[in-house]
Every structure is written in C-alpha cells, then in structure tokens.
Amino acid sequence: MEILLQRFYEKYNQTSLRIVRSFILSVDWSNRFVGIRGSRGVGKTTLVLQYLKQNYKPGHRVLYVSLDHLYFSDHSLYDLASQFQNKGGELLALDEVHRYPRWAQELKSIYDDFPSLRVIFTGSSLLELSKAKADLSRRAVMYDMPGLSFREFLAFKQIAIIPLVTLQELFENHIVKALEICTLIKPLQHFQDYLEHGYYPFFLENLKSFHQKLHETIQVTLEIDIPQSESVQTSHIILLKKLLQVISGSVPFKPNMNAISQRTGISLNTLKRYIKYLSDAGLVSILTTPDSGINSLNKPEKIYLGNTNLMYSLSPENTEKGNIRETFFISQLFFHSLHSDRKADFLVNNNYLVEIGGVNKRKHQIQEHPNGFIVKDNIETGYENVIPLWLFGFLY
C-alpha cells in the first residue's frame, strides 16, 4: 500500500488548480459512491485529483489509485479498501475501474461491508452499471463527463472566462448573449482552433503532437477499452478499426446497414453492436428519429464522428464545412436530447427545430414552425431566429 500512497502524493503535488472545469460543480460529491464516466482523454483523472486537492491534505484520510497499476496483479481491490479503512481512511478514489476484471462485484462488496467509506471511481464511457452483475446502479450515482466545450477551451487557453449560457437563454435571448460575449472576445478568431484541437484537454501538453496523441487514444479505446468492457475477441479488433475507418470516410451519412455489412465483412447483428460500442466510447454519434426507441440501432438516421477533433485526426480529407458544423453542434449539446427531423437537421429537446448552414442559409425549411431556428456559421451575432453557430459552445 505504501507504493500507492507515494504515487498518489506525486500526482497530488503535480495537480494544478489553475483551471478547474465547471463540471466539478455539477457533481454531488457527498454521495457515498460517485462514478464519473467519460471517453478516454476528456480529463476524468485530472478532475478527481483536483477535487481531492481542493478538499483534502495528503495523508491517511484519502487515497487515489489507478486500477491499471501493477499492484493489482497480486492484490485485490477489496483487500486494499479493507486495509485503507482500518488505517483511518475515509475517501478512496479509484481511477480506470474498467481495467480491473472484478470491479463491479468488489465495489458492491466494499459498499456493503464498509459503510463509513466513501468511494469515487472513474471509468470508460462504455461502463454500464445496469449491466453489472453486482447491480451497482442502485448504489452509485453516475455522471457522464464530455470533452471541453468551446467555452472551456477559451478558459483553458486563458483567453476569457465566460459564464454558461442555458439552452433556453440561447434560443430566447441569443442576440443579447452573443453581444455580451463579443464585448470580451472575438469568438470567430478562436473557433477554428477549437474545431481542430480543442475538445481534449491534452492539447495544452504539446500542440504539435496533439493529433498523434489523439490517434494513440483512439487505438487504446479500440484495442483495450472496448474489448475489455464488451468482451470483444482480440481477433475482431481489426473489424472495429475497419468499421470506424468506413464511418470516418463517409460522415455524416444515412447508413445502409446491409451495405456496410457487406463492405466490412461484419455480420449485421455484430455490426449493430459494434456501432453501439463506438458510440458508447464517444468515437461516433448516432442520430435517430424521436420514435426510434429500442430500434434506434436498426435504423440510425445518420452517423457522425464524436467531435470535430476526431474528424481532423481520422479523416482530414473529409472535413467538409457542413460535416464540421453539424458535428460541432451535436458535440456541444451533450446534455440535451437530439434527434433528426423531416423538416430540419435537428430536433432539440423535442421542442426546437434547427437547420444548420453557412451565412447564405435560407429560412424556408423552418419558417412555419414557431420554434424553428437557423444556426449559421461565420457570423458573430444573429437576428430574429438566426443564431451564430459558435454560441452553442457555451452550453456547458
């Protein structure tokens, strides 16, 4: 256990509080078991370490460990929790729980056997507590963490710290909100940088190697995270990669599942599962109709890459403006309901119709809808029911 404490103290000392994501305020840390789920690279580890540094001094009361540490090759998580509590431990932070084979069963036992111990754990966005044999869904409060919004990117770059804009404010009062922000910054001056490399916080480490690191992150997701979480055979990893390559070269598109199955050599049922895995991992986004329900994977309306950074990394030759605009829009509405619609590009929260385009986009498709809006790229401020695209980057 001493080696884990030493490693924690090193990480604790290296953790900066200069910029802390506002997501930290949305988590109720007082719950006994708190789970944070998110795609690889979005900053889960940093967020947890920042919470610990804000609230605890290094000592016997708190311990952070990553479950991919060699310590767990011959020690169990349950035994660590028992030993930690016996020494006066109060809060155990567990990173990368999906890398530990028996994580669900042992977390349940820890919850049941050590009622005074609080646990924070992070895991892949593939983590599904409802599927866990131990039924942790009744014990843990889960939060889904996205990558950086455009607003957060500006804060990380120390360009400006700007308050959140709610979705209702954006649709009902977008002119005032855009003008307020434009008095502080020129949003279009920084927008392209965000689209290319602003979604993942590690852009701060080395911008020149950003896309190389993003490629490595994608590889780890495909080769380790998905196979471990979903029991995908090692021999089938090449099929996952092939599927992602086909999607990235075609997005956004209305998929013909039979055609994709023939092109990739993946059976139809397996193909549906693999698309879901890629979606759960944050590598793609699936757009469905409002009434798709449980059949959403049978007839997805469109498939996009998960964010614009992935577009520039996986398919730089396919960064057509329309694709980028729609992909950005989807990624920024992480906490909202989004569907396709016959009359427009998107239906937001089953209420707002949105059509996306450039500065010359016309209104005819949504003009008869009371909550119809045109979202335009390359404009600083809007008018009437025309909203600048960049403003949707301030929703979280």
Image (cartoon, rainbow, N blue to C red):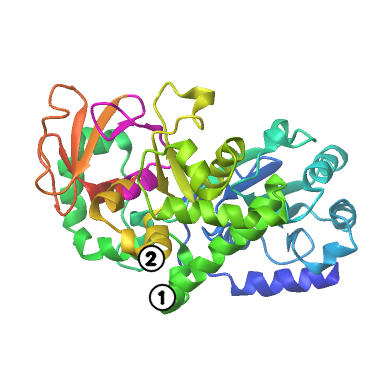
Identify the residue at image location x=34%, y=48%: 327
Where is mark 2, residue-wise?
197
330 in magenta: yes
What is the count of numbered marks?
A: 2
Amino acid of disc 2: His
Label 2's element?
Answer: helix
Query: Does residue 17 appear in this view?
Result: no
Pointers 2 and 1 in contact (C-beta within 8 Å)? yes
Judged from the image, the secondary structure of the residue bearing numbered disc 1 is: helix
Q: Which residue is mark 1?
A: 207
- Between the residue at mark 2 and the residue at mark 1, the CA separation in whole angstroms equals 8 Å
Q: Is residue 221 left or right of residue 287?
A: right
| Residue 392 appears left or right of 339 | left
- What is the span of residues highlighted in magenta in the rendered image? 327-350
* Residue 174 screen position, x and y as percent: 19, 40
Q: Is residue 159 above or below residue 373?
A: below
Label 2 Cα neighbours within 10 Å, binned few <14 / some 14-19 / many ≥20: many
Indicate whether residue 237 is drawn in magenta. no
| Left or right, 60 with reference to 53 | right
**Amino acid type, callout 1:** Leu
- Using the rendered image of the protein, determine whether residue 19 is visible from the camera's viewpoint: yes
Name the side, left or right, on which 217 lies relative to 196.
right
Q: Is residue 133 above or below residue 221?
A: above
Measured as percent of width and height from the top left, residue 91 is found at: 74, 52
Which residue is nearer to you in this view: 241 or 190?
241
Task: Measuring from the top left, give residue 14's x and y in whole percent.
Answer: 60, 74
> Can you tell which quarter of the image residue 312 is in?
bottom left
State which tag comes first along the sequence, 2 or 1.
2
Q: Position of residue 224 (x, y in %)?
A: 67, 58
In the figure, 20 relative to 342: above or below? below
Q: In the displayed structure, would residue 343 be above or below residue 287?
A: above
Q: Residue at x 61, y 40 (%)?
A: 270
